[in-house]
Image (tube, rainbow, N blue to C red):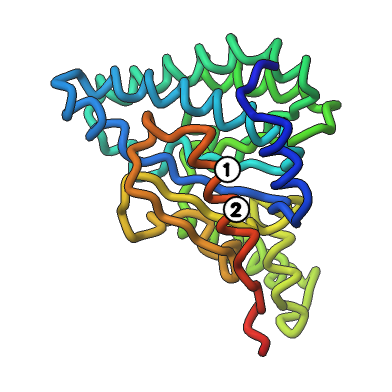
Amino acid sequence: MNSSLSSTSLAELKSKKLPAHIAMIMDGNGRWAKKRLLNRINGHEKGAETVRTVVRTCRQLGIPYLTLYAFSTENWQRPKAEIEALMVILKNFLQTELSEMMENNIRLRAIGQVEKLPTDVRQELNDTMAVTRGNSGMSLILALSYGGRAEIVRMVQAIAEKIRSGRIEPQAVNAELIAEHLYTRDIPDPDLLIRTSGEMRISNFLLWQIAYTEIFVTPTLWPDFSEDELLQILKDYQNRERRFGQV
């Protein structure tokens, strides 16, 4: 794995506590393309290169979990041609990055309504997850056809069915039980959420899980997001005091 991370940068960051789980809202591909008089698809293709950079950097830093908001439930409302192009980019990414995931001990996982993905894309995703299942260096989690509200609705339905069938009592419902019925049931909540493009919203992403997550919004459009900026954000994170509602 090639990286421009200097030993000094690594040592400086690793001398303090790093987040165990980084979540990222990758926004700005379309605006990046528009500024350059390019097709939106060109922005998504450039954004895929940024994904590669971010994954490599997090792996070298030893971040255990990285979740990328790759395709939301609302994204299905985009023009058909753009959706089809996004699915092609996703499939190509899975194919081209498999060898690097294996080489660098990265496990691929997915959360969301993946059953809605095109059959060929879903098969490629399932195959890649199966091949990388034994890797333990880092979990790369793709949020695909994902929506936080849809996840919560799914959780409520599952718990309600268990109550209806008598498998659990209503009094048994607590935060731990809810977490066990989310897509992320065996994944720690994010310590840090990064959003690119400057939009001050969370866009239906991990609504339950980010209750005490540190948030960093950068005006940088996703295709321009760099390793250096990620390192600066991590330095900022290390200077924050996390109190989790306590004094």
Quarter of image, res 210: bottom right
Q: Residue 145: where, in percent of width, then height?
A: 46, 39
Question: Vertical placement of 194 versus 98: above or below?
Answer: below
Question: Vertical placement of 142 versus 50: above or below?
Answer: below
Say whether residue 216 is left or right of residue 213: left
Residue reaching furthest to the left: 37
Q: Amino acid at mark 1?
A: Leu
| SS at circle 1 | helix
Asked if labels 1 and 2 touch by Cβ distance under 8 angstroms, the answer is yes
Q: Number of marks in the image?
A: 2
Local packing at callout 1 (Cα closer than 10 Å; few below 14, some 14-19, many 20+) is some
Q: Amino acid at mark 2?
A: Lys
Q: Which mark is residue 235?
A: 2
Report the residue at 70% width, 10% height from top.
Answer: 99
Q: Which residue is mark 1?
A: 231
Q: Residue 104: where, in percent of width, then height?
A: 77, 21
Quarter of image, res 242: bottom right
